Image (tube, rainbow, N blue to C red):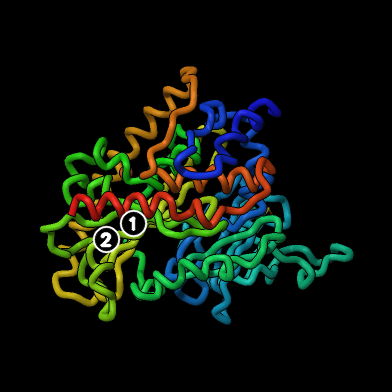
Amino acid sequence: MNSLLAAMAPSCTASSPALASTLPPGAYGSEELFEIESEKIFRSAWMPLCREEQVGEINSYYSIDLLGMALVVTRDRYGEVRVLSRTCRHRWMEIACGSGVAPALQCPYHLWTYAMDGHLVGAPEMQGVEDFCKEEIALQSYRHEIWQGFIFVNLDGQAEPLAPQLSGLDEYLELYDFGGYQTITPTDWGECAWDWKVMVDNFMECYHHMGPHRKSLESEYPAKLSYTDAGGEAFSLMWACQAGGYEATPPFLSPGAAGLPDELRHKLAIFIVYPLLQVVVGPGFMYWLKTLPLGPGRIQLQLDIAMSPAALAAPDLEARQKELIEAIVEIHKEDLDVCAAVQRAISGGAQGQGRLSLLEQPLWEFYQYLGRRLGLATDGLSADSKHVGQDLAMDERAISA
Ligand code: FES
Ligand SMILES: [Fe+2]
């Protein structure tokens, strides 16, 4: 393991995007590395579970498995959101599955019943059992935080509060009326045979628009017009910019918030809140990837699609929803094909580390994040180097304009 971490260190400590390389292939499927990631990243960071509107009603619940742990997000009768274990306090049966609204969560094994705040409220045939006090029994509860409508869990309870780390991102999102975006549909992509880092690598660059998306995205959102914005230790942000001559049309770019500056009507924000919240936002829509790590080289993948308040209020909603979902699903399939192929090559013994284009600056930022979490680097992002990719991309746009 030490040799793999040592091999990762140069990529995770490269001092600028112009010096960036990929991680070594061995980082995408190592059992030992996954154990370290589970402890130093997944259990100690803020992990996204669902959106607030997915537990919008009193007594609603939403089940999700994370790192083998059966969790349920609930909204109790006072309107409070909770993140609870789904493991029964009697003999460990799962007390719920799926999502919905119910007066309580009842274990199907011996019918112990839990209120949505996690407390045991019913346990049949337990009279005569000594020292059994149901008021003292509750499902295990986990620390959560809600940011911009996303419900996150921090499993080890030790993470720094999330919202203050994302204030730089809030400034952009406010302009979109982002807090009011509503999920219109989840899409489930099942178990996928690639590492969570392959998914992040793919998501956080538009360089590949000219490859797998050459027919779907490259003309309107050319790779070379994408650029990385100022991020932070907790997030990275980039933009996919519309080429000249295109209108800001539905379903991606319109309709949007009334006060949205014209510039933002012609581009898409792509951001990651480390390690796993991956979001694309436009004036009319957003979608996010729920990448649930199952093990080295394996994830459970969902993609949830939402629309902006303006898009939800505009005429012909049904037709625009259909168009939005179809477009995202088609583009996403193009991404999944390359992710699967990359992991196959890695599993087949791929060697060597590739150099990164400046269009892939967010990958350099991602590896810096990994370096900090895995103890390979102690420095934060250098303010000077943060802007190198952006400046170069802007220069290029100025030249091509
Ligand atoms: S295991 Fe849940 S009631 Fe027995
Ligand atoms: Fe893509």
The quadrant holding residue 72 is bottom right
Residue at left offset 38%, top offset 38%: 357
Numbered circle sitting on residue 267: 2
Numbered circle sitting on residue 350: none
Numbered circle sitting on residue 239: 1
Q: CA distance from mark 2 to mark 1?
A: 6 Å
Question: Which quarter of the image is occupied by the C terminus?
Answer: bottom left
Q: Is residue 245 left or right of residue 222?
A: left
Q: Amino acid at mark 1?
A: Trp
Instruction: Answer whether labels 2 and 1 touch (C-beta < 8 Å).
Output: yes
Q: Is residue 59 left or right of residue 184?
A: right
Q: Amino acid at mark 2?
A: Lys
Q: Secondary structure at mark 1?
A: strand
- Of all residues, the one furthest to the right in this rendering is 130
- Of all residues, the one furthest to the left in this rendering is 245
Residue at left offset 48%, top offset 65%: 150
Q: Position of residue 9 (x, y in %)?
A: 62, 35
Residue at left offset 58%, top offset 70%: 164
The quadrant holding residue 56 is bottom left
Say whether residue 271 is visible.
yes
Q: Position of residue 93 (x, y in %)?
A: 65, 50
Number of residues whose C-alpha sits closer than 10 Å to that of mark 1, classed few (under 14), some (14–19) or many (20 or more): many
